[in-house]
Amino acid sequence: MQTIFGSVGTILRMIKIEHSIFALPYAWAGCCLAANGLPSLRTFVYLTLAMIAIRSVAMAFNRLADLPYDRLNPRTQMRPLVTGAITKSQTVGFCVCMSYLFIFSCGALNETCFWLSFLALAIVIVYSYLKRYTSLCHFWLGGTLGLAPIAGWLSISPTTLPLAPILLALAVLFWVGAFDIYYAFLDVDFDRAYGLHSVPADMGTDKALAIAGFSHGMTAIFLVLTGYAANLSIWWYIICAGITFLLVCEHKLMLPKDLRYVNTAFFTFNGIIAPIMLGGILLGLFC
């Protein structure tokens, strides 16, 4: 029994379960926008389970797909799958269990979410292989997380999809695309050596910074447009100004020749931005 729980704990550490905070607030935001307030507890629980499950599938499957490269990359050689702390069969079993949980949770929400759950699983699985073929992988990842506010909306209103959740999804797409470009700075030399694609590896660090900066600018624009489409109060725009300031600070931290602050830019700032955004949605709806 201790071995079983130990393996589960190691898997949860491998997939960085705490980083669910990046996507969950956007799903909750879409849900609140559709409900024009707070959703029912039942919807909230199943939506949360679905989001945690699909992110778990995405991370665990990505570790499996990247295993041949993780064994070669000095930065990733201590990952549990590489060291043998977790076996491939355990990881596959975890992916299967989380996939079932995701499909079940989506089915518990409504029929539309149930059928779309299979498409969502396919989208997250495809991401794990894109780096072998295109530097657009960053924006595919952004689009994957961008499904969160749309999923939240559909959990409440499965027959409609207005502009507000779509605009919020586009904001997430560019936000994630930018910070994933930042994270790719850590592996520029490795990616080039092994024929893997990323914006920094393919286009150089200066162009990568410019593309990330442009993406953050698009994030700010689409956040403002979301408020307009959803008829949110002035509080939303105040929060948008704060988020834009954080994005500028994050961009300023990124220096290609000094990567000490990559984790600060990637985890700390982005871990703050998502909950702030959710707070802005709630303020915009209620105040």
Image (spheres, rainbow, N blue to C red):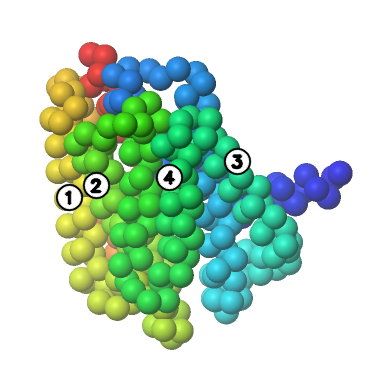
Disc 4 on helix, strand or loop?
A: helix
Disc 3 packing (10 Å; few <14; some 14–19; many ≥20) = some
Residue type at mark 1 is Met
Q: Residue furthest top?
A: 287
The answer, for residue 253, to whether it is visible in the render is no
Which of the two marks, 2 or 3, is nearer to us in this view? 3
Q: Secondary structure at mark 2?
A: helix
Q: Are marks 2 and 3 in contact (CB under 8 Å)?
A: no
Q: Are marks 1 and 2 in contact (CB under 8 Å)?
A: yes
C-alpha distance separating marks 4 and 3: 14 Å
- Which residue is painted at 22% across and 71% down in the image? 206
Mark 2, other Cα within 10 Å: few <14 / some 14–19 / many ≥20: many
Closer to the chain start, of discs 4 and 3, is: 3
The amino acid type, in three-letter code, at marker 2 is Leu
Q: Nearer the viewer, residue 256 or 234?
A: 234
The percent coordinates of residue 63 (x first, y second) are: 57, 63
Residue 117: x, y in percent? Answer: 47, 45
Residue on which disc 2 sits: 170
Q: Which label was assigned to residue 7?
A: none
Task: Return the disc, 3 or 1, that comes first in the chain's sequence.
Answer: 3
* Element type where label 1 sits in the image: helix
| Circle 4 residue | 116
